Image (cartoon, helix red, strand yellow):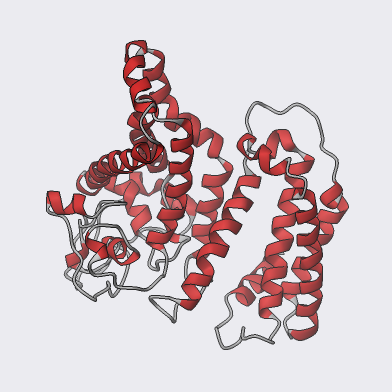
Amino acid sequence: MAGYFTKLMRDLESPVEVRRFGSGWFAGFFALLFAISGFVMVVALKFPAVFTTPELQIVRDWAGFRTAIHVMLLASYALALLSLLLRPRKVLGLTALMIGMGAALLGGASVEADNARGWGMFFGIDFFVVNLLATGFMYAPLERFVPHRREQRLFRHEWREDLFYFLVSSMFVQILAFLSLAPSQIINANTNSWDAFRAGVASLPWAVQFITVLVVSDVLQYWYHRLFHQVPFLWGFHAVHHSAKSMDWLAGSRMHIVEIVLLRAVTSLPLFTLGFDAAVMQAYLGFIYVWSSLLHANVGGNFNRLGHWIATPRFHHWHHGLEREAFDVNFAIHFPWIDKLFGTFHLPEDRWPKDYGIPEDVPTGYGGQFLYPWTRTGKKLDEGSGAEPAE
């Protein structure tokens, strides 16, 4: 089994010249993507109490939802067969075919739900698939057609680790939300005297509320972000995020679970306690998912003037740069003018960082990176590089 998985990974990570159009690689890749997505959705429909996200019920109730799953599985079968015909290596097409058959055996798009009661806790695999497909189909074409680094592949170094981070943050969305929103809920339960103020905030025009949320959250994130760079123990958590040596839309998901909880808890305090309309908050949460992926994406464009006022990929890439000039700069997520106010703005005209990462030897793999904040020594990765640890 391990050998088969190794062959599958080797085929996915094939050099660009090997996976040209007509080679069967693209057919095999999309067959595998659709087969896995379809299988996961069938599992979610089969065991809704355990594997579905309540907020996505409106999607699952859509009349065309099961038809879409059926079409996805049919497409995976057709593309798998095409890949098997065209490609000397059969592992992509064969794997997609087996996963698609597994989905069919479970009942396919017509699967009946197991109505057994859940445990009161769910794992959002449906959210994982929807989120992955939405962001993937949004940014993968951009990175291919308007890239900053043209030579960087979709399946670049460490993509597996980042995909696993993406999976964890999606599947454990309920637990993360509970922990993150606990402080806000406690404040709301004990501040009935704020109701008049909250009513006033909720009465503001929608656009005014949304812009206010962006500014308030960015000011909070700026100082939170800066604190995690300056306090050695906190840096151990944030170093995991900065350990990515390549930047693309998936790299933004590499965050230690403790930092995710703390970040969301800090930013949610004013947003969920000051009375902003629920529709504004929903729009903001959707926006931040898209925006965060964009800032990390391998998307070109210098935007020298715009980058001084609105965060762009180049602005945030400098935050991840390995060069000494890139250390402790560009902490804002939406508005670079906040960095200008506090003296941490850095955006040299027409220049991008040469390399990404940090001068520390952060372990590879989720387990080692989870333990890293408690096991790190702050030792330099390369004593001859002249770079220094963040602390």
Rendered location of residue 269, percent (x, y): 35, 29
| Residue situated in front as seen by the camera: 40 or 281 | 281
Whether residue 106 is visible here, answered yes or no, is no
Rendered location of residue 93, percent (x, y): 76, 73
| Residue situated in front as seen by the camera: 266 or 56 | 56
261 left or right, relative to 40: left
Q: Quadrant of residue 6?
A: bottom right
Q: Residue at x 31, y 39 (%)?
A: 212
249 left or right, relative to 40: left
Residue 271, compared with residue 1, is above or below; it is above
| Residue situated in front as seen by the camera: 280 or 229 | 280
Residue 336, compared with residue 261, is above or below; it is below
Residue 121, compared with residue 97, is above or below; it is above
Residue 309, compared with residue 209, is above or below; it is below
Rendered location of residue 150, percent (x, y): 43, 80
Figure label count: 0
345 left or right, relative to 272: left
Rendered location of residue 182, percent (x, y): 43, 25
Q: Residue at x 27, y 48 (%)?
A: 235
Quadrant (top left, top right, bottom left, bottom right) of the N terminus: bottom right
Q: Residue at x 42, y 48 (%)?
A: 288
Q: Residue at x 62, y 30 (%)?
A: 121
